[in-house]
Every structure is written in C-alpha cells, then in structure tokens.
Image (cartoon, rainbow, N blue to C red):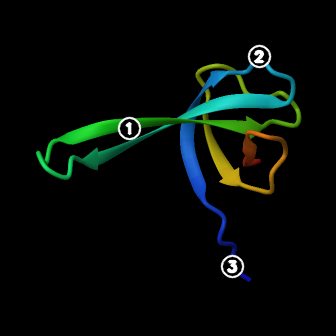
C-alpha cells in the first residue's frame, strides 16, 4: 500500500519547546507575472518525540495526524 503523506526537507530554526521543533522549508517559485524566481519560506511545527533536533540541523518531515493545534508534521526517523 502506498502512502499519500507529504514529505518536506528543511532546516530546524527553533527547538525551545518540549517535543516540538520549528522547521523552515524553502522552495523556489516563478512569479506569475514577472517570471522572476523568488524564494518562499514556510515554517512548520513538527513533533520531535526524543528532542533530538538541534538548531541548524537538516531534517526530513512527514505529514501525520494532528498532534496539537498547530502540529501536523513529525520528524522522519532515519
């Protein structure tokens, strides 16, 4: 069975919360009118069960069930 969960890669920007980290995911898109390539940054709150993420780490995150009001992603184990 194939999973339809989204996977993103990003950099940890904060780990001050318990079992939660903030991951910034960067993507590039072309502006619809001017055709300039622009950088789009989005931050996700991710579930980090063992508090292993440190600021600056590159991590893979995967979509999961809602863990709290703002957490719908978790760090993918390697």
Q: Are marks 2 and 3 in contact (CB under 8 Å)?
A: no
Q: Are marks 1 and 3 in contact (CB under 8 Å)?
A: no
Distance (Cα) linking label 2 and label 3: 34 Å
**Residue 40 visible, this orientation:** yes
Q: Earlier in the sequence, mark 2 or mark 3?
A: 3
Q: Residues within 10 Å of mark 1 (few under 14, many from 20)?
A: few
Residue 14's disc is none
Task: Say above or below: 33 vs 40.
Answer: below
Which x, y percent locates residue 69?
79, 40
Which x, y percent locates residue 34?
11, 45
Q: Residue at point 66% right, 47% down?
A: 61
Residue that sits furthest to the top in the current view: 16
Of discs 2 and 3, which sits in the foreground? 2
- Say which quarter of the image contains residue 6: bottom right
Which x, y percent locates residue 73?
72, 47
Q: Which element carries disc 1, helix, strand or loop?
A: strand
Residue 40's disc is 1
Q: Which element carries disc 2, helix, strand or loop?
A: loop
Distance (Cα) linking label 1 and label 2: 24 Å
Q: Is residue 35 left or right of residue 14?
A: left
On the rendered image, what quadrant is the N terminus found in? Answer: bottom right
Q: Which element carries disc 3, helix, strand or loop?
A: loop
Q: Is residue 50 left or right of residue 27?
A: right
Q: Residue at point 69% right, 73% down?
A: 3
Q: Residues within 10 Å of mark 3 (few under 14, many from 20)?
A: few
Q: What residue is disc 3 on? A: 2
- Say which quarter of the image contains residue 58: top right
Q: Residues within 10 Å of mark 2 (few under 14, many from 20)?
A: few
Q: What residue is disc 2 on? A: 16
């Amino acid at each position: 069975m194939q999973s339809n969960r989204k996977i993103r890669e990003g950099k940890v920007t904060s780990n001050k919360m318990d079992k939660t980290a903030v991951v910034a995911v960067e993507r590039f898109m072309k502006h619809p009118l001017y055709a300039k390539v622009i950088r789009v940054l989005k931050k996700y709150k991710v579930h980090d069960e063992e508090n292993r993420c440190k600021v600056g780490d590159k991590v893979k995150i995967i979509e999961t069930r809602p863990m709290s009001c703002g957490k719908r992603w978790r760090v993918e184990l390697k």
